[in-house]
Image: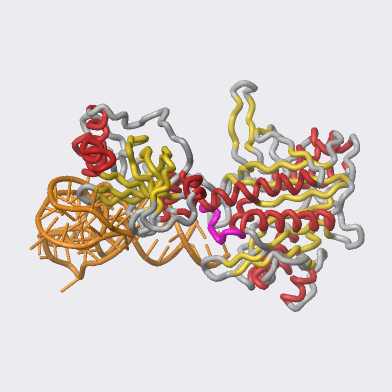
RNA sequence: GGGUCGCUAGCUCAAUGGUAGAGCUGCGGACUUUUAAUCCGUAGGUUCGGGGUUCGAGCCCCCGGCGACCCA
């Protein structure tokens, strides 16, 4: 029989690692000695941050007369014979030193502190705010109490935690690595800024279905599940687009949604199976209007999240979001890079030859436009040094986009590239229900031929459009990628609890 | 999907095919001003899992798991 150290049972208690066994014993002994190991209702009077703010510049060895009750997690501990020091950290990262002196707490409290308190425990300390002889702002305790006994040791400080552990045990990562908390807080600032940016522009935040009976709005494989109540197959949404457009038909002329999408596809440094997307739609706008709003939203979010429009990352790369962002034409830039003219009329066979020459895998069902986009990704994207809007995409990869008003064979669509990553897309939306039906029928034919990413014919969406969909612009922006751009981290660092494979089979 | 690298004590890492070690953590002791304290002592291992080669495997081979990076 094997024992699992992470699933202790009474029988397995003796097999626990020594440090965990000892902490469990301390928990028992605390209770036995009359101290609650997980005390509720502690007489906390203020926060560590407030204490620091109230006493910013005390000279060394000063007594303030200010008596406080504070709580925090022990992240540093030093016991000398009759005087103990501990650094307590609050959730906001603020820290203060607690001092437990024989003269102030008496023999019993000093002994129990030394016996029971470990790194990682939450403790409560009440006493006077002072500075130590070394000038450290401290609370000289009259009393201490255990707030929560930690049964597992913290990783050793000053060593970087294994990347896998950081993701699997984010709670530990958040405790020991300030940057982890910083990323989480940056996400909050970004989303709040986006809401403010759009609300100020008279957009309404609405909620549309995540469980859908038909997936659409993007080309991607969905997660499939089953509704017991209705006894039908349902899909986790790959995009909210078709419902947001329905809302515009109904007269909600400026709408947005910031929430999770799900795509049952590969996971790598820039793709997560669940990811957060902003989509917004504005009646009577076109893709140029939407490009401007998108840039402004991005810039406002950067100011809110990182305090500026340029960011230097740990690896030395610099993100520069300043000014108006350049626009390049998709076909023109591919043509320039290849040294020959590529147009929407370039035959598929020739594009296949060009792709194969560059070692680009050609999917059997790939349409010509897809091949042009592959060539573009391969040749042009690596040359971008600034955020760039790539304009006017092939119609065969963009079934929901309006045809370009002057250029044949392309649609009014841009993709936004930031730091080499596709970070957003914007359309002049297709609103003609007759053309939309033709496009979706073509997609359905692709699906019938085995393209698992192709769209399906959504009759209710077409019915909505037949009621008169105003011309409009629409945008989707990946929030995780925005976080990546702002922080320089991989997508799994920007998502607090990313999907990970189970540790045991 | 392909390739490369990694997985060893609570954490971070060592270890020519030949007794699995170190630092920090922990435990015991000293110390009323410590800041990654110091000093003395000490404990701690299914080397990711399974199979194989070998007198002998953490190391070599095969299969599998998880992760990182690169490529497509």
Q: Is residue A440 magenta?
A: no
Count the marks. 0
Q: Quadrant of the C terminus of chain A?
A: top left
Q: Looking at the image, is A334 positioned above or below residue A276?
A: below
Assign the magenta stretch its main secondary structure. helix
Residue A447: image x %, image y %?
70, 44
Residue pictured at 82% horizontal, 43% vertical: A202
- Residue A354 visible, this orientation: no
Please tell me whether residue A321 is drawn above or below residue A250 in the rendered image.
below
Q: Which residue is at a point 59% across and 39% down the rendered structure image?
A: A223
Colour convention = secondary structure
**Residue A215 occupies quadrant:** top right
A145 or A246, nearer to the observer:
A145
For image coordinates 67% across by 57% down, the residue present is A303
Q: Is residue A324 visible?
A: yes
Side (left or right) of A242 relative to B48: right
- Observer-nearest of A124 and B7: A124
Q: Residue furthest top?
A: A229
On screen, residue A448 versus residue A99, left or right, reads: right
x and y percentages locating residue A181 in the rendered image: 50, 50
In the displayed image of the protein, which residue is found farthest to the bottom?
Answer: A339
The one nearer the camera, A173 or A114, is: A114
Residue A291 in the image: x percent, y percent? 79, 57
**Residue A330: quarter of image:** bottom right
Image coords of residue B32 (percent x, y): 23, 53
**Over which residues does the magenta segment extend?**
A485-493
Q: Is residue A487 magenta?
A: yes
State which quarter of the image contains the N terminus of chain A: top left
Q: Residue at x 21, y 30 (%)?
A: A11
């Amino acid at each position: 029989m094997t024992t699992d150290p992470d699933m202790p049972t009474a029988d397995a208690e003796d097999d626990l690692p020594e440090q965990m066994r000892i902490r469990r014993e301390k928990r028992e002994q605390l209770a036995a000695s009359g101290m609650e190991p997980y005390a509720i209702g502690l007489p906390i009077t203020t926060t560590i941050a407030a204490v620091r703010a109230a006493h910013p510049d005390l000279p060394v060895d000063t007594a303030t007369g200010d008596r406080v009750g504070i709580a925090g997690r022990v992240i540093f501990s030093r016991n000398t014979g009759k005087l103990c020091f501990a650094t307590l950290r609050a959730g906001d990262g603020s820290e203060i030193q607690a001092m437990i002196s024989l003269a102030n707490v008496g023999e019993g409290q000093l002994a129990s502190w030394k016996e029971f308190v470990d790194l990682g425990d939450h403790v409560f300390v009440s006493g006077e705010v002072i500075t130590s002889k070394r000038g450290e702002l401290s609370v000289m305790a009259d009393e201490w109490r255990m707030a929560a006994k930690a049964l597992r040791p913290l990783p050793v400080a000053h060593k970087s935690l294994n990347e896998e552990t950081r993701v699997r045990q984010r709670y530990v990562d958040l405790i020991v690595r300030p940057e982890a908390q910083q990323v989480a807080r940056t996400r909050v600032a970004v989303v709040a800024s986006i809401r403010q940016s759009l609300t100020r522009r008279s957009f309404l935040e609405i909620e549309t279905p995540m469980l859908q009976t038909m997936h659409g709005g993007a080309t991607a494989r969905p997660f499939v599940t089953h509704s017991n109540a209705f006894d039908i197959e349902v899909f986790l949404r790959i995009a909210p687009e078709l419902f947001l457009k329905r809302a515009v038909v109904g007269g909600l002329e400026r709408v947005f949604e910031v929430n999770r999408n799900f795509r049952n596809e590969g996971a790598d440094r820039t793709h997560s199976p669940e990811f957060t997307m902003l989509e917004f739609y504005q009646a009577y706008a076109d893709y140029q209007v939407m490009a401007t709003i998108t840039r402004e939203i991005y810039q406002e979010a950067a100011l809110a999240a990182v305090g500026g429009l340029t960011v230097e990352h740990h690896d030395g790369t610099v993100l520069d979001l300043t000014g108006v962002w350049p626009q390049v034409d998709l076909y023109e830039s591919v043509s320039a890079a290849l040294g020959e003219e590529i147009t929407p009329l370039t035959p598929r066979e020739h594009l296949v030859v060009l792709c194969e020459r560059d070692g680009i895998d050609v999917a059997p069902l790939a349409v010509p436009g897809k091949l042009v986009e592959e060539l573009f990704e391969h040749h042009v994207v690596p040359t971008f040094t600034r955020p760039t809007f790539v304009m006017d995409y092939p119609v065969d990869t963009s079934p929901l986009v309006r045809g370009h008003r002057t250029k044949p064979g392309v649609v009014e669509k841009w993709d936004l590239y930031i730091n080499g990553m596709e970070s957003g897309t914007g359309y002049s939306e297709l609103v003609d229900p007759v053309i939309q039906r033709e496009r979706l029928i073509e997609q359905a034919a692709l699906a019938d031929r085995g393209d698992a990413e192709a769209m399906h014919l959504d009759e209710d969406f077409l019915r909505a459009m037949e009621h008169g969909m105003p011309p409009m612009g629409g945008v989707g922006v990946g929030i995780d990628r925005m976080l990546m751009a702002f922080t320089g981290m991989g997508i799994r660092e920007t998502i607090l609890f990313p999907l990970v494979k189970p540790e045991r089979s």
